[in-house]
Amino acid sequence: MSKEEFILKKGLLVCLTLLCAFAAVSAQTKGTINYPTKAINLIVPWNPGDGTDIVARTYVQALKNYLSVPIVVLNKPGASGSIGTLYAAQRPADGYTVLFSAETPGTFEVMGIGNVSFSAFDGIIMMVEDTKAIVVKGNSPYKTLGDLISAIKANPGKIKMAYSGPGASGHIQGLLLKKMGFETSMTPFGGGSAGMTAVMGGQVDFTFANLTTTFGYLDSGDLRALAVFTDKRAKRLPDVPAFTEVVSDSKKYLPLGFPNCVLVPAGTPQHVKDILIEASKKAIQDPVWTEFLAARAYNTLHEITGDAVNEYWKDWSSRVCWLLHDAGVTKDSPEKFGIPRK
């Protein structure tokens, strides 16, 4: 064999080796590089018709315009959202399972509800937070927040309050009332809609409701809003006071937001997350979404995407978990889970 033939054969062998390696890599990554190629499941760990579910389904209606596959909404409610959250965390990290989450994973561990938290997920985008309103039945004897506060003070532990579940927003708000010296009788009802139904049915005296889900009931007179649980009045209810206007000591605790967000299981490939982030940025500009927001009282947090979502929840969990712990309702100290005190 001549020197030229030897060099030629060696060169061919190197080329074949490189081609085989490239083919192997292509075969391994084909399913992800071409993402998405099949339907995406969006998990909502709350009941159909609840506030988080309504936001999630509207987001999907906008998002599907910017992805080439169907998006299927799967409701998996229960245990303050922990059942659906755990289900999502256990799915493959391939971008075909997306979680539309409320705030509750930030408290699961300290409340002893589950061993999954926001650390099991990677952030895509923060969505919206709804103003919380204290509502009573339309013909309730409590005409003002002052009336309700006076009744709670006069009957500690007897005025009945509905909330969705342990560690959820209503529970935290009830504990904040207790911290301010207003002790109520708190009963979980599994979701915000069920809580409002309990108020209208006379089973409880009041609840903290997502403002955007109450407008129809307020207009019909079935419910009455006594205050919004924050430090500013809501534009849609200019005559309803902010809680801090009536209870000045509450300014040290409010505002405290309870937003929702879009997550994927931790370890999802970066290019898949980038596709979902870019599609979400387009979706929040879509008329389906913008018109939805225009008719409601949401605050948006859309500028928070990717890793910043996880940072947001680290800070939130620190504030809220220590609040719960100081109130004596947590199963374990936040320190056990590496949650620093803010």
Image: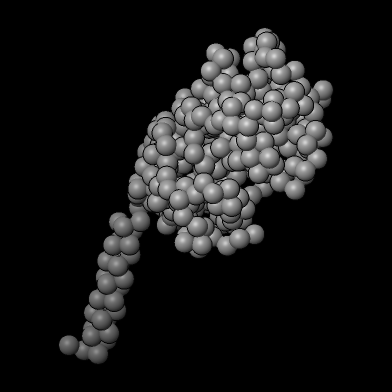
Q: Residue drawn at (75%, 48%), measured in percent from left and top? A: 252
Up the image or down, 110 lies above or below 238; here it is below
Up the image or down, 296 lies above or below 283; here it is above
Which part of the image, by quadrant, shows the N terminus? bottom left
Residue sticking out furthest to the left: 1
Q: How is the image coloured?
A: one colour
In the foreground, 177 or 153:
153
Q: Residue drawn at (64%, 15%), measured in percent from left and top? A: 137
Is any part of residue 203 visible from this angle?
yes
Which part of the image, by quadrant, shows the C terminus? bottom right
Q: Residue drawn at (23%, 79%), measured in percent from left and top? A: 9
In the foreground, 145 or 107:
145
Up the image or down, 99 lies above or below 318; here it is above
In the foreground, 116 or 101:
116
Q: Residue 127 appears at what percent x and percent y?
A: 61, 40
Q: Residue 3 appears at what percent x and percent y?
A: 25, 90
Is any part of residue 193 visible from this angle?
no
Q: Residue 285 appears at what percent x and percent y?
A: 66, 36
Which picture quadrant has residue 310? bottom right
Q: Residue 236 appears at what percent x and percent y?
A: 76, 24
User: In the image, 285: left or right of 11?
Assistant: right
Report the number of numbered marks: 0
Up the image or down, 271 lies above or below 135; here it is below
Q: Residue drawn at (61%, 26%), measured in percent from left and top? A: 159
Which picture quadrant has residue 6? bottom left
User: In the image, 126: left or right of 191?
Assistant: right
Residue sticking out furthest to the bottom: 3
